Image: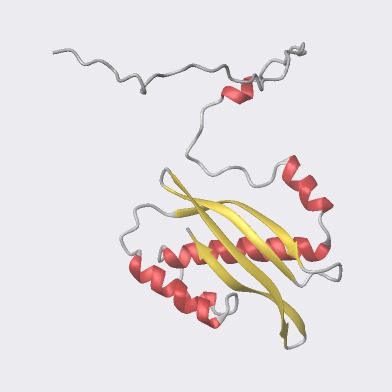
């Protein structure tokens, strides 16, 4: 049995407008450097190379202080989650409600395989053109072969004889 298409079910092909730009001559790309092809290693990256020092030198003093504080605080948070550091060491660094949250993650993640290693931290100033009072911090950490995200907000809070930095928001991915 053969089926014939009905006269209404005809198909037509219509040309499509060419949206591609006209070809242009392109200069030859420079060759890739041998370092591009180097193998990845499982060891932690060097912390002090020329680019990082140049970037740190171009930051203002409050931004450098915020970056140093955020790096230390996030490392300490990961160490508490991995149970390599006691949780009471987080109390001066984090807002009180965040310490409880980290402890909950600590209890839930008791079966983590491998230590968490903070890989990269970047920060961005928050607020108007006045003195730096807050910064958004974002970065990555690895656990074995997986890369995870971590972010927080640090703010200057009043202390006994001035101000100090404190983590007021935290997100661990």
Percent x, y for residue 160? 73, 88
Percent x, y for residue 76? 53, 66
Tell me how many marks there are: 0
Q: Residue at x 54, y 79 (%)?
A: 91
Residue 109 lies, with reference to residue 142, above or below; the image says below
Residue 54 horizontal side relative to residue 6, left or right:
right
Q: Residue at x 62, y 43 (%)?
A: 46
Q: Quadrant of residue 158?
A: bottom right
Residue sitting at the far right: 130
Q: Quadrant of residue 130?
A: bottom right
Residue sitting at the far front: 7
Q: Nearer the viewer, residue 171 or 33?
A: 171
Percent x, y for residue 31? 69, 15
Q: Residue at x 41, y 46 (%)?
A: 144
The answer to whether one can see residue 92 in this image is yes
Scheme of colours in the image: secondary structure
Residue 79 lies, with reference to residue 8, above or below; the image says below
Q: Residue at x 80, y 45 (%)?
A: 54
The answer to whether one can see residue 84 in this image is no
Q: Nearer the viewer, residue 123 or 75?
A: 123
Residue 140 horizontal side relative to residue 159, left or right:
left
Residue 104 lies, with reference to residue 138, above or below; the image says below
Q: Nearer the viewer, residue 146 or 12?
A: 12
Quadrant for the N terminus, please: top left
Residue sitting at the far bottom: 160
Q: Nearer the viewer, residue 23 or 115?
A: 23
């Amino acid at each position: 049995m053969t089926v014939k298409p009905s006269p209404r079910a005809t198909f037509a092909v219509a040309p499509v407008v060419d949206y591609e730009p006209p070809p242009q001559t392109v200069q030859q790309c420079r060759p890739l450097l041998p370092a591009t092809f180097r193998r990845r290693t499982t060891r932690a990256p060097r912390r002090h190379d020329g680019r990082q020092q140049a970037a740190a030198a171009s930051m203002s003093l409050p931004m450098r202080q915020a970056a140093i504080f955020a790096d230390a605080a996030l490392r300490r948070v990961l160490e508490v989650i991995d149970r390599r550091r006691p949780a009471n060491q987080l109390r001066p660094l984090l807002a009180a409600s965040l310490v409880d949250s980290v402890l909950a993650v600590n209890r839930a993640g008791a079966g983590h395989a491998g230590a968490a290693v903070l890989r990269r931290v970047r920060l961005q100033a928050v607020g108007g053109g006045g003195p730096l009072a807050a910064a958004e911090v974002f970065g990555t950490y690895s656990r074995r072969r997986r890369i995870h995200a971590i972010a927080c907000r640090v703010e200057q809070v009043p202390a006994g004889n001035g101000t100090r930095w404190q983590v007021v928001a935290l997100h661990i991915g």
